[in-house]
Image (tube, rainbow, N blue to C red):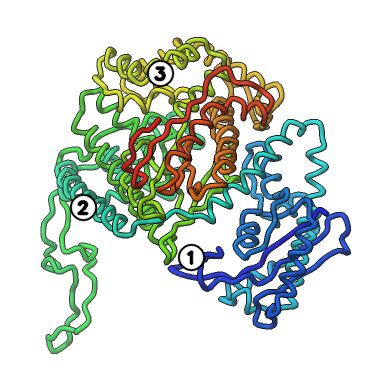
Amino acid sequence: MRLVLDVENSVTWRDGKTFNDPFEKTNELVQIGTLNVDNLKDEDVFTFNHNEHKDIYGIARNNLQYILDYTELLIMHNAKHDLMWLWESGFKYDGAIYDTMLAEYILHRGVKQPVGLAACAERRNLNAQKEDYLSACLKKGINTHETDLNKLSLYLRHDLRTTSELFHAQQRDYQDSSSTTLHKIRDVTFQTCRTLTRMYMSGIRVDKLALESVREEFKKEKAELETKLQKQVRVLMGDTPINLNSPEQLSQLIFSLKVNDKKDWAGLFDYSDDFKATVKANSKTMRKTKAYTCSTCNGEGKTYKVKKDGTKYSKPNKCKDCDALGYKLDELNEMAGLGFFPPDVSWVSANGFSTAKDKLDVLSATAKNNNKYDASRFIEDVKRLSAIDTYLSSFVEGISTYTKPDGYLHATLTQHITSTGRFSGKEPNMQNMPRGGTFPVKKVFVSRWSEGHILEADFAQLEFRVAAFLAQDEVAMNEIATGFDVHSYTAKVISDAGQPTSRQEAKAHTFAPLFGATGYGRSTAEAAYYSHFTEKYKGIANWHQALADEALRFLKITNISGRQYAFPNVERRPNNKGVTHFTKIKNYPVQGLATGDIVPVVLNRLHELLQPLQSVLVNTVHDSMVVDVHPDEKIKVLSIISSLNNSITDLVEDTYGFRMNVPMLLEAKIGPNWLDTKDVM
């Protein structure tokens, strides 16, 4: 039997967020609906915990389990949520699954479109609910178990029917000859969904004392940076106050320009051919200032009206002359700020000019290239301050918010967000963790066992190896085979070009050209490496051109794994200057095969191999897999990683039907927490 299943559960509201997982103590399984896609009359709604009915004697539970025992394919929209509730509630199901949300995502071929059930139904002209009854109730603060039971059941039945229609529509799409190669991608994606669900359910233990220690370390560094930067701001701007968290004020400091009219600013460049002239005509140069006490309010920022008898009114007014600041500013005859000028219109933002990280990278390199080391250090400090703010809000606060009272964090991984097929994360998004082994937040993740270990197994140079294989670049393949240190080589090229660079600093540049990065805006020495990359790896450069030709010819790229990427609007640029979307055309096949196709296959196999053990898979980030190792199973787990190393090529071939002639390598490290680990293979 092929069965559509949908779960309705109560939710918990806390700290302005909605938690709908079964690991909240107050959340309960309310209803589960089932529908036979091959016989629509075969439909059931089982109610477990609702104010109007409770399954006291377990009749609904037994009946549902009986149906599941005879189910060959379980069809769900957002299967991870439904499976999690099903398994955590004690139901057993080990058969095949089909997720209509993930199936739709794969059919989109990397083009981002919403994949919620309502959006899919609207796009495909399917029958769907005109009003979302449950969402409307939740917005009013009415929890799922408090709703009208008949209306909730009707809502659930509607979703079952819509999911059934979506399933049949997708089946027709997958039967089309243009979608044949997507079948294996779909099957691996569904298997990975099961693995990620089990991993989510396991969770990873958080050391709350260590988390507070990390919080204090970051807060201390933030305070020191803010003090240092504000002293420099005073030198650069005089007495003009600058909030470094304000994109507008930071733009004024960096570019020494203030926009005349913010309302019209961004639109001015839509029809202008002369970028520099437009900038100069619609902005003014920032000048350093000197503050003096406002004579109207005597520095108080407020004034008082006087009654006829000469006494003041008790309620003050804001001083209009100084805008309640208590001081006024005199402009001096000296330019303020760093004095950068934006290169082109792509730098224009609503508040002036962009101060995004990639733009700050360019400015820092430009400053170095022109021997303006103070300016470069200032920008690097601004970047670091921004990074610390992100670490505190996204990671420290995120981990604190989403860690359950039992000390476990169930971090969410999604499979339907990115264009390439790799995972994305939320609650919190640990996929955004800085690469490398020095991120302090990692030390808060510890084993659930007092003498246990945290093991991280990650691929060595995965994307470079994948690019070498896809391009069959002989130079790259030889370097991989001989263990050539590409990062040291990068450092040498940059250093020889006049910018002494360490191996660690060079890592940021080594593989960047694989994904469309160029030497534009870089220092002269760094730009030399980017040019050298194309000359050195001619096979990769030629393959990039072949990808562009394929995209132009078919408006899509079919990767060797079968995954497809659509480029419906790709065009050749005028004067034969390449093609549009070239960065994505180069990036998607490499990142897709590496972290969208290979990592999931290995992750699934690792999960299978761990099943007889107490050790559990607890996370995956980028191209790494994290295992909580039981104290008695260290040798067994290391043996599993070793066996995986010897079988990656076979796993890929068995799954996708091609054999890689570039070796894949897993490196493992283990320790008492995720940060303090030592290499073991």
Q: Horizontal and vertical percent for residue 564?
A: 67, 31
Q: Amino acid at mark 2?
A: Lys
Q: Amino acid at mark 1?
A: Lys
Q: Amino acid at mark 3?
A: Tyr
Q: Is residue 295 visible?
A: yes
Foreground tag (3 vs 1): 1
* Residue that appears at 26% across and 37% down: 379
Q: Which is more N-terminal, label 3 or label 2?
A: 2
Residues under numbered marks 1 and 2 in contact, where contact means CB atoms less than 8 Å apart: no
Q: What residue is pinned by disc 3? A: 530
Crowding around mark 1 (Cα neighbors within 10 Å: few <14, some 14 to 19, many 20+) is few
Q: Horizontal and vertical percent for residue 113?
A: 64, 45
| Drawn side of residue 205 relative to residue 592, left or right | left
Q: Disc count in the image?
A: 3
Q: Quadrant of residue 150?
A: bottom right
Q: Please tell me whether mark 3 sits on a helix, a strand or a loop.
A: helix
Q: Is residue 575 visible?
A: no
Q: Please tell me whether mark 1 sits on a helix, a strand or a loop.
A: strand
Q: Quadrant of residue 322?
A: bottom left
The quarter in which the N terminus is drawn is: bottom right
Which residue ends up furthest to the front in the rendered image? 632
Q: What residue is pinned by disc 1? A: 17
Q: Against 596, is 8 above or below?
A: below
Q: Please tell me whether mark 2 sits on a helix, a strand or a loop.
A: helix
Pick whichever, 107 or 606, lies toward us: 606
Q: What residue is pinned by disc 2? A: 220
Foreground tag (2 vs 3): 2
Cα–Cα gap, marks 1 and 2: 28 Å
Q: Which is more N-terminal, label 1 or label 3?
A: 1
* Residue that appears at 26% across and 51% down: 218
Pick whichever, 672 or 362, lies toward us: 672
The quarter in which the C terminus is drawn is: top left
